[in-house]
């Protein structure tokens, strides 16, 4: 029987996940398919019941279900508990489990960086910022600071993880050798061409990481690169959170380079 996987979210706009996972299934010859399931918030309990009774083998979970889904699972990873959000549902035997592969996705492109950044500033305080802070701590970055337009949200996040909170006005004044944008500034649409950082405040040799992946080359990354920074595109985070999901569901690895080429072609 064909194994079914899919993404739940509301509203579920265009998503690259079906293309990524269906490519993996085809590459490895697995009898499986990945679908997009728009799901309103109050439909979640009934949907999870379907997951328990139908041949649904895994879910990607996005807004607004990332927190709510936790109440319906049998086991949740420490990582997802620390973040307070699940983006991946998978089966371990007859247990329906939750993981947060956004954290894995944030960290993966930074592994192997030599030297490892020692201090990081995270811009924004939403779900992506939580994943970034958790990931940077997991990676062993010693000093992490969070800055957000609405300070109270940064304070709450900083308190949860025991990191520093910095005023939005002072975000470029803290010591940093990794700066990570998790705000939507620079995203295609009304915010394209905007940036949360002054070009003159990038330092050569530092790392600039954008969670935005559409467009691939944001103003933030272009200016960082021009200033001699190493840059990491949001495409890498998206790719690696997806590769980690695929591994949890199938126990197999899809070809990373092929998957990256596919995403690049879809975003070009
Ligand atoms: P995500 O789940 O992607 O992290 P989110 O939870 O909506 O999305 O968080 C978006 C973050 O970007 C928030 O921290 C938001 O700041 P506020 O808390 O002040 O709303 C930040 N953000 C959104 N638009 C912004 C803008 N124009 N300038 C600066 N920060 C912005």
Image (cartoon, rainbow, N blue to C red):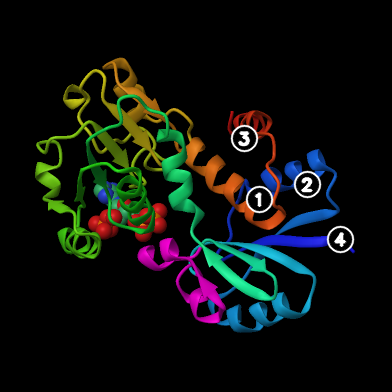
Q: Secondary structure at mark 2?
A: helix
Residue under label 1, please give it: 246
**Residue 85 is a magenta residue:** yes
Q: Quadrant of ligand 1?
A: bottom left
Circles 1 and 3: CB distance less than 8 Å?
A: no
Residue under label 4, please give it: 2
Q: Percent position (x, y) of residue 227? A: 26, 17
Residue under label 3, please give it: 263
Circles 2 and 1: CB distance less than 8 Å?
A: no
Q: Quadrant of residue 226?
A: top left
- Viewer-side residue, 96 vs 128: 96
Task: Mark 4 or mark 2: name the one nearer the start of the chain.
Answer: 4
Q: Quadrant of residue 116?
A: top left
Residue under label 2, please give it: 25
Span highlighted in magenta in the image: 65-86
Task: Mark 1 or mark 4: name the one nearer the start of the chain.
Answer: 4
Task: Mark 1 or mark 3: name the one nearer the start of the chain.
Answer: 1
Q: Percent position (x, y) of residue 219? A: 35, 28
Rounded to the nearest angstrom, the CA distance separating label 1 from label 4 is 16 Å
Rendered view: 112 above or below 6: above
């Amino acid at each position: 029987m064909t194994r079914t996987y899919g993404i739940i979210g509301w509203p579920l706009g265009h998503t690259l996940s079906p293309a990524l996972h269906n490519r993996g299934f085809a590459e490895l010859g697995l009898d499986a398919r990945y679908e997009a399931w728009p799901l309103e918030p109050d439909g979640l309990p009934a949907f999870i019941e379907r997951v328990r009774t139908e041949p649904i083998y895994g879910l990607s979970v996005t807004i607004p279900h990332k927190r709510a889904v936790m109440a319906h699972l049998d086991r949740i990873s420490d990582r997802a508990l620390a973040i307070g959000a699940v983006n991946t549902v998978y089966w371990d035997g007859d247990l329906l489990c939750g993981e947060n592969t956004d954290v894995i996705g944030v960290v993966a492109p930074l592994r192997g960086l030599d030297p490892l950044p020692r201090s990081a500033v995270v811009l924004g305080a939403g779900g992506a910022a939580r994943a970034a802070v958790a990931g940077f701590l997991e990676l062993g970055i010693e000093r992490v600071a969070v800055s957000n337009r609405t300070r109270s949200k940064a304070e709450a996040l900083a308190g949860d993880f025991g990191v520093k909170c910095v005023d939005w006005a002072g975000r470029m004044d803290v010591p940093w050798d990794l700066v990570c944008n998790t705000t939507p500034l620079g995203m295609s649409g009304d915010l394209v061409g905007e940036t949360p950082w002054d070009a003159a405040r990038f330092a050569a040799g530092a790392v600039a990481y954008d969670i935005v992946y559409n467009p691939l080359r944001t103003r933030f990354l272009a200016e960082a690169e021009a200033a001699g920074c190493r840059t990491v595109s949001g495409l890498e985070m998206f790719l690696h959170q997806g590769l980690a999901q695929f591994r949890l569901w199938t126990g197999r690895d899809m070809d990373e380079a092929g998957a990256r080429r596919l995403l690049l072609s879809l975003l070009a």
